[in-house]
Image (cartoon, helix red, strand yellow):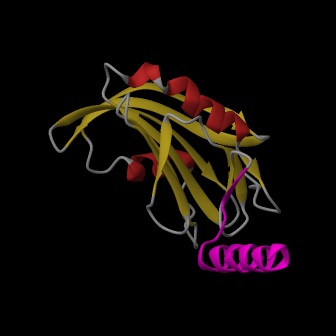
Amino acid sequence: MKGKTWIITFYLILTFNGCQSIQIVNNEYSDLQGFYRVTIPGESWERIKINNEGLAMRNKENNANFAIISHPTGTNKATLDTLYKQLFIGIKERNILKKQYVYINNQRVLHIVLEGELDNLKLRISAYIIKTKDLIYDIVYWSSPDKFDISLDDFERVIKSFKFIGDQRSEV
């Protein structure tokens, strides 16, 4: 019986892994394309399914969210300053609180913090925009202004852990 149990367990592991791609191992998320890796925040955060090419998480307690979305640069010669304006299309009453260039994993990145309104909800947003040779990464955290700072440290740890895998860094 011991041998049969092992065979059944092995079969279930193979079946489970074949049906679902494992992207989170030891609290690290790796995108399916293998371009980047980040450490995800603790248990108070739950993953939200958005697509196969990004990560989104929600902290129900603090009504905070973050997402990492990548999209091709194509032949787009847009600067980081242009890209952030595209990211915030649809947000009304925009008030930029901070705009600065920072470095993440030796990569120059535009960091924007702003307040605005989307669908009659007031939001505070912290966004990092990264442009590489082939992709643009929008890493965005948002919450209501009164709860924004509560989970911000979790998001900043995600940002600090962001690592490119392979040759994705920009020449910019």
Residue at point 31%, 51% (across, down): 89
Residue at point 71%, 56% (across, down): 36
Residue at point 80%, 74% (across, down): 6
Q: Is residue 19 magenta?
A: yes
Left or right of 66, for residue 90: left
* Nearer to us in this view, 81 or 38: 38
Judge whether 22 appears above or below 162 on screen. below
Q: Magenta segment, principal secondary structure?
A: helix
Judge whether 70 appears above or below 14 on screen. above
Instruction: Single out the residue that lies furthest toward the front.
Output: 1
Q: Is residue 80 magenta?
A: no
On the image, the x and y values in percent for residue 56 come to 48, 51
Left or right of 117, for residue 49: right
Judge whether 51 appears above or below 58 on screen. below
Instruction: Single out the residue that lies furthest toward the left.
Output: 120
Judge whether 53 appears above or below 83 on screen. below
On the image, the x and y values in percent for residue 45 come to 50, 39
Residue 70 seen anywhere in this rendered image of the structure: no
* Nearer to us in this view, 143 or 98: 143
Residue at point 62%, 33% (across, down): 101
Identify the magenta region.
1-25
